[in-house]
Image (cartoon, rainbow, N blue to C red):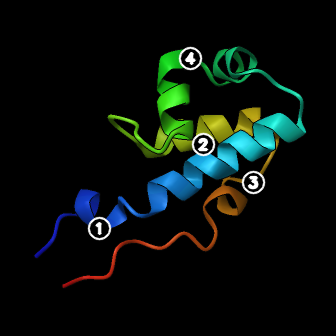
Amino acid sequence: MPTPNRTARAAIPELGRRVRARRKALDLTQQDLAYSAGMAISWLSSLERGKPKRLELPGILAIAEALEMDPADLIRGLRADPLP
């Protein structure tokens, strides 16, 4: 059975695009958002590029709050890789 990390990889780049688009719509820098969400700029940058080393629910919740949006709106419609 595939691990959740493997099957969820396809969704991460789209999540990163959504974070970047919302951040820019709010006219925030990565530094502004990282500070508001309580995370490192380097991690936020890697998320926006779709390549975070770790992605966990508390991080998604903190980002959504800093972006002034419902976490459900941030992840709605994301799809994982199809299972083999």
Q: Left or right: 7 with respect to 73?
A: left
Q: Are marks 1 and 3 in contact (CB under 8 Å)?
A: no
Query: N-terminal of the two: label 2 or label 3?
Result: 2
Of 63 and 30, the residue lying toward us = 30
What secondary structure is marked by label 4? helix
Comparing labels 4 and 3, the label whose residue is closer to the camera = 4
What secondary structure is marked by label 2? helix
Mark seen at residue 7 = 1
Query: N-terminal of the two: label 1 or label 4?
Result: 1
Amino acid tagged 2: Leu
Residue labelled with disc 4: 41
- The residue depicted at 50 percent of the width and 37 percent of the height is 47
Note whether residue 40 is visible.
no
Residue labelled with disc 2: 61
Residue 64: x and y in percent read 69, 43
Amino acid tagged 3: Asp
